[in-house]
Amino acid sequence: MDRQVTRRGFLALLGGGAVGTVFSPLPWKLLDDAAIWTQNWSWLPRLPRGEVRTHASHCTLCPAGCGISVRTVGGEPFGISPIPGHPLSGGALCPLGFAAHHMAYHPCRLTDPIRRVRERGPLAHVPIAMSEAISEARAWIGAAGGKGAVAVLDARPERVISTLYRWLLEPLGGVYVAAPGGEASFDALDEMLIDPPGPVGLDLAAARTCLSFGAPLLDGWGSPGALPGDVHIIQIETRPSRTALHAGRWLRLHPGTEATLALGIAHVILAEGWANEPLLRERGADFATYRQLALDLTPARTAELTGIGEGEIRAAARRFAQEGPSLALAGTDPGGGPLPREAQLAVWGLNLLVGSFGPPGGIVRRRAPAAPRRRLGDLPDRSIQLLLLDPSVTEAAFPWSLVARKLAGDQAKVISLSPYDAGMALRADLVLPAPAPMETRDEVTAPATAPADALALSRPLRRPPKGVLPVGEMLRQLAGEAAGFDYEALLREKVAAIEASARGSVYEPATGESTPLSGDLTSALEEGACWVDERPAAWPLPEFRLLGGGADARERMRRAVFERPNDAGLVLMPWGWRGAAGAGALPQVAAKLYRESHLRGEADSARIHPETGRSAGLRDGGRARLGTPAGFREVVVAFDAAVLPGVIHVATGPANSSFGDVEPVLGGLVDLCRIDESGSWRLTPVTVGEA
Amino acid sequence: MDRGILVRGADRAPLSRFGLWLLPWIALLAFGIYGAYACFAYGLNQTNMDNRFAFGLWIFLDLTVIALGAGAFFTGFLLYILKRKELKDVINSAVVLGFICYSGAVAVLVVDVGQPIRAWFTFWHPNVHSMLTEVTFCITCYLIVLLIEYIPIVLKNRRLRQIPAFLVFEFELHKLMIVFAALGTFLSFFHQGSLGGLYGVLHGRPFAYREGFAIWPSTFFLFILSAIAAGPSFLILITRLVSRITGKRLVGAGVYDLLARISGWLLAVYIFLKSLDTLIWLNRTAPAVGFLGYDFYTQPSFGTWILFAEIIIFGLLPAFILTNAKRRRKPAWLVTGALLTCLGIAVNRYVMTIQTLALPTLSFDPFLQYSPSWQEIAAFLLVVAYGVILFSFSYRYLPLYPREKELGALKAPSP
Amino acid sequence: MKDHRVGNLRFGMAIDIDRCTGCGACMMACAVENNTSVPPPEAGDRRGLTWIRVYRVDNGKPYPENRTVYFPVACQHCDHKTPCVPVCPQNAVDIDPQNGIVSTIPERCLGCRYCMAACPYHARYFNWWDPVWPKGMERSFNPDVSPRMRGVVEKCNFCHGRWQAARAQAAAEGRRDFREGDFVPACVEACPVGAMTFGNLLDPGSEIYRLIHGPRAFRLLERIGTQTKVYYLSDHAWVRALGDKLPEGGAHG
């Protein structure tokens, strides 16, 4: 063929081909396929498939132990809901509980032990094998010589695990210490009672009036969620917390004047004759001294010192004394720490004044005796050579300096058992990976403030990664595989003991009913049931010292009550909410939601009165620099007309951006705080300037 | 080097100088492509738009650019339907300008949507109640019309003319121009109007919502009017700009005069109707849902000054200038009037887009601000650079201005 | 547009503002139930994905006259001239004639955001980023809700996945009617103080019917005429006024 391919011909072919293609199925098929391609990129997650099953269990993120209903698919939990009417939670669940199943996938989650390599950076670490980690830990245990040289810090005492810790420490002469902070501190109450009758609980649900001195009832105190329906809450705190804003009455007092107000209320109660004075005189070893001190503090003086009007003080006192059962609570903010010792004494003392000790609606007795534990502050300085941190300490919020001063210098070692390399675990030289929620069988007990003991189980609903051992098993290995270190066996023993006692009732989530305990508790617990102890009979008022022990008790109380703390200048009051007060790991979706809604105080968010802010040169929404002798910190400022002038409230917790790609940071706001003689870090003088 | 394809009879700069002229625009184009690429690769988080400012710089500029590109269809309407022969001088450049405006707007829209590959879903699942569906269909059709109108201009190129098939094709196509002009007019009325209708139907936004006729809110008609008022003005500006840059007269004086007169009177009618519409809106429409006019202008950045600026400085003033025969014959006045008209349209689109979204609706909403990110600006500059480059090539190789040679240099006395 | 309503089932919600403590459990339960993605920290509160968002609103007065309430706002499921339904160019927004739920088809959404401009309640959220999940986390997703990709709009749909599961359950039981308690959106189930009620607004025997016809009920932006199906309850006049109070520049939020 002699035909040449000309350019024209070629162009004609192209043109004709283009037109023809339009009439063929090709472009339309490609368009259609594009629709499918845009819906199925390879990086889109594939949803799990399988049968959806529902299990009743209990949440372990915090001591509240709320009952939860967990849906699983393919052996993996995907949804968590509260169980209405549950005895531990009242049918509530805090926001964090809904995403407990996400914690297994947290970016900070550890699947291998890690050894800190501080030469490369404060948080640098290398993963090591479990066997190597255990043998290194055992070497450190062996090397720590002397009585009191090994210590365990536990934020949730009274569990079976706590027993294992004590067994570990016993041959070493070690000390078992309850971590500072926590939701309730009964230490001052113990000091007040000459012959402590054992553990106590607070029967808030049966009270009619509650005088809450800073107890964050809505932010993680006892069980989360609701303020009990019928109680009239008088919230006494400086900060406009959610509890304060929802309480029946909010008394905004000057920072650090809780003892003054408590004694001021005591004055009114005594002056009006609303207290059972003969009984108090009989049981109270120092009642006369206390009475005199209280009567010296006139309502006018109280008003002047606390900033609360006289009328309010009288009204609160009247309500507390006359509309009982009443309960006065010495609160502990998860981020701000406990009240000072004298304030606690004064507040608990109010319960004794009105007879709220024993009967329902007041301070009630719990059954199981507490095992002895030491307070961190009581340990000698520089005495600990090896410190073991329980997983519950990871998210705790207290100044690390409280611990650091007890460590024996640079050669002291810290081992943390933690599912995440975050929070307090960042302080450790060795971190052993603990299981994430719902990966192992865990014991759930009633919170420390509950009026009765309880026992339930958190059931394993997903398989932990290989290499992650249950805490009990790790302790067994740390103890050299000593006999008897069998967590499961100890738990069974505890259940058997309860069965044998035939006390209390069992709540069945399937039926929603509580029936008296009879017969098999073990299988009921395995199905998600919850055992609640019966209330012991009210016991007679023990003898007490309202001003606490020590020769200088009166003088200390007098100083605490009559002298207003030096508050020239700005005062920093840190605060937190339970589960997120420390720099531990949060579900990513929680951090996301709070920063996308500004609903809760995200870490380093500060609230200040507009005038105070403006006179410090700050802008609403701007950044500020806080300075204390311990260091500086940048915060984001929000003006709030409800804040007391002269105070700045800063939220503790994990930084909102500290998940995912960004490295966690050592130390938090509480490390800047000043610690007073009683170990409280609630108030810190601070300087502020625009950042 | 490219002598063979240059416009016959007219003088053009040497290729090297042309290349030098293109260089900065190509650089801008590259920058723009990078900005657009960033949005495709990383997502629309590259912009400063957010959940409150769902529309931002791009939508505002799209609407402005489409309104300014109305000169294309309106000139075609005036020429082919109303037989205003003077506009033959300028119709080709108007078509090219229109094509640039619309294709640029469509390009920016492709970057603006979250899922550009699904853009064709509107054709597959159209929602007859949505103004945006109407806009999509109309603009797509109109872009095709513009392409069809552009083709004969391309085929007028010196070399391409020599191919008999193209010559015949171009000749036959030219006979159909009136059909395409009519079609273009019809389509343009609808999409210019629907772009206005986009805002007017938002009864959840009392600032934007307007009453109207049947399903069309008043903004439907106002947008059409403002577009046909601004189109000729934009054409005037561009033609004078090209004239300045090339140093040639390019079009007869009668062209400017006609365009300016039409623009001025249309603007005057538009401003009258807009003022009427504003009064109705402030006194009836908005109060019917409980909003007093003052509520819309409490923020200093969007105070009542913006309303007065739009109507008086950018509306009455240029109408006043352009409707007066003596004034519009003076180049300074002409350019000022045309510029103010175009800016007025931009202000109007800005107010309807950005102010609508900035105003809080719930009582606990804050007033928020928005300013575009560099990626958004880059994508828009992409369109500008693309436009300049395409227009430059068209001017160089295609007879955009048929009377160019005849009219001679800018400085020479008019023939 | 012709009336889309059919039958006697119209889902709605009542939220008691006096009870809401602003804990955010509803926000958490919603995000977990719907496999909501986690944008990076720079998203802030303007580019987040909060299908239900709790606003903190106070009356701006100093102590002791200060009052603060928390306002959960999600899609209001407007019943009359739903602003977002007629504006979507590709019919990706639909109001179900049988139950009144306004839902989006994320696979069809083009991401033009016109519906977001139309919604006065800021209930619609755009995926400004590609969702990025830790490896393996999709195993813990809710299998009933498809995750969304970047560039599409999403919003509350009264937990449509749960509604479909409830319908399947009812069908298995051989019935076609809806009974109170058949299904409940995640937020309502989660509220620890029981501030949220959900049900059929047209059923005179239901709890929600009683609530919305009481004196405490009000809606957001009633004057615009959207006839939202989410009601709010409060004893306090200043709170009720928030529904229609004219916005001030820089109102507290």
Image (cartoon, grey):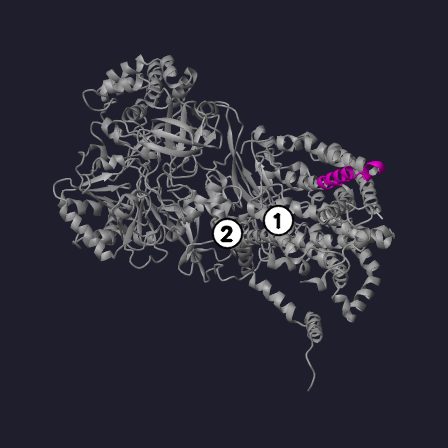
State which region is magenta.
Answer: B325-344
Residue B127 in view here: no
Read off the residue under disc 1: B381
Q: Residue at x 41, y 19 (%)?
A: A308
Q: Is residue B249 left or right of residue C206?
A: right
Residue A399 in view here: yes
- Amino acid identity at mark 2: Asn
Quadrant of residue B227 in the image? top right
**CA separation in Å, label 2 and label 1:** 39 Å
Q: Nearer the viewer, residue A668 or B26?
A: B26
Location of residue B77 in the rendering, given as x and y in whole percent from the top left corner: 82, 52
Q: Secondary structure at mark 1?
A: helix
Q: Is residue C193 left or right of residue C101?
A: left
Read off the residue under disc 2: C34
Q: Which mark is residue A592?
A: none
Q: Are marks 2 and 1 in contact (CB under 8 Å)?
A: no
Location of residue C176 in the rendering, given as x and y in whole percent from the top left corner: 60, 57
Quadrant of residue A360 in the image? top left
Mark 2, other Cα within 10 Å: few <14 / some 14–19 / many ≥20: many
Q: Secondary structure at mark 2?
A: loop
Q: Is residue B249 left or right of residue A253?
A: right
Mark 1, other Cα within 10 Å: few <14 / some 14–19 / many ≥20: many
In the image, is residue B332 above or below residue B182?
above
- Amino acid identity at mark 1: Leu
Chain of the residue under the numbered disc 1 shown in the image: B
Kindly report which numbered mark, 2 or 1, lies closer to the viewer in this rendering: 1
Location of residue A514 in the rendering, given as x and y in whole percent from the top left corner: 38, 45
Location of residue A253 in the rendering, given as x and y in whole percent from the top left corner: 39, 22
Farthest residue in the front direction?
B412
